[in-house]
Amino acid sequence: MSDYKAPVFLTELLRAKSPSGAEAQAQAVFDAHVKPHADAYADDALGNRIATLNAKGAPTLMLAGHMDELGLIITYVNKDGYLYFDTIGGHDRSIISGRRVIIQTANGLVKGVTGKRAIHLMDESDRKKVPEIHEIWIDIGAKTKAEALTRIAIGDVATYDHEFELINGSIGTARAFDNKVGAYIVGEALVRLAKEKAKLNARLVSVATTQEEIGTRGAQTSAFAVDPHVALIVDVGHATDHPDCDQRKFGETKLGGGPIICRGPNINPKVFDRLVAVAKKLKIPYQLEADPRPTGTDARAIQMARGGVACGLVSIPLRYMHTPSEVVDLQDVEDCVKLFAAFAKSLGKGESFNW
């Protein structure tokens, strides 16, 4: 067995249950670990957490990673006490049923199981179908609608009951590496720079954003408020080193190969060049990916905030995205923290990334 120890800040974020629009548990973790090290700390109407270091510096560098995750939201209870739901974020319907879930209620956590008709009770054609969302339910062991409604309420949210675990050295699995690793990276980079009393020219603002999974909403409002000149966004990206992944379509990236630095229209070319230069200087391993359109990350919103922001995007290689058992090498996460902290220290006074 490996003696690798995952960072406490990260493990607490992974344990937090924070579907889009219900990020309170992740907010509390970010508050506890980052706020004590920030020169200024703020929240906002969308629930973003905004931590500032060297408030009078220039340019303004924004680091952004979203803290929300996929979830379910209760929409209806039938007469027999079974709960029906809709999805928060992009789920694979083929893997929703047969899962243990935890529902957040006003009276605490309620455990349940997602159910559907058993395969024995299906005909051959039914067995080939992926169930629709309304054909799956949550069973909390209630016998009637009235009983169920004493325990839960319409609008309560749920997450899969799959917790973080190391499976081999620094390789771990969790239900929500997407994107608790990003929130950790931006918070941890600020904490380390504060602890070492780094001499920064830049004003550094680390933001744990909300509601990315339903449209990069927290990034849009926080970027307007922060008004950065340059921003580094971190999310997860697809590791393509597993079977049934055509690299001709999806490129070549792997777990443990280092952070993935993106190129394309969503990325400022000067920011990209600086990220690569910093990685090379510090001998931080990195990988490259190309994206020909606005990315499916907070970078798409931040780049277009106000008069435009010079953005870089770095992704943590991840297998099995948007499943209850995502897989990440935590060494890639550590390397990204180092990359972001070094990028912040590399900025010159008043430096511009206009081109």
Image (spheres, rainbow, N blue to C red):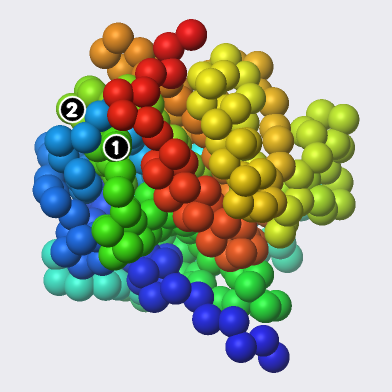
- Closest to the observer: 346 or 313? 346
Where 123 falls versus 299 (above or below)? Answer: below
Q: Earlier in the sequence, mark 1 or mark 2?
A: 1
Question: The residue under label 1 is which amino acid type?
Answer: Asn
Question: The residue under label 2 is which amino acid type?
Answer: Ala
Q: Is residue 98 left or right of residue 187?
A: right
Report the residue at 76% width, 44% height from top.
Answer: 253
Rendering coords of residue 250 (x, y %): 77, 33
Any part of residue 134 in sight:
no
> Which structural element holds mark 2?
helix
Rendering coords of residue 100 (x, y %): 48, 70
Where 281 falls versus 172 (above or below)? Answer: above
Reading the image, the residue beneath label 1 is 201
- Characterize the local packing of mark 1: few (<14), some (14-19) or many (20 or more) Cα atoms within 10 angstroms: many
Any part of residue 55 in sight:
yes
Image quarter hosting the N terminus: bottom right
Rendering coords of residue 39 (x, y %): 14, 51
Distance of label 1 from label 2 (alpha carbons):
20 Å
Report the residue at 40% width, 34% height from top.
Answer: 347
Report the residue at 18% width, 54% height from top.
Answer: 38
- Closest to the observer: 190 or 7? 190
Reading the image, the residue beneath label 2 is 225
Q: Is residue 54 left or right of residue 111?
A: left
Report the residue at 60% width, 27% height from top.
Answer: 273
Rendering coords of residue 284 (x, y %): 64, 52
- Characterize the local packing of mark 2: few (<14), some (14-19) or many (20 or more) Cα atoms within 10 angstroms: few
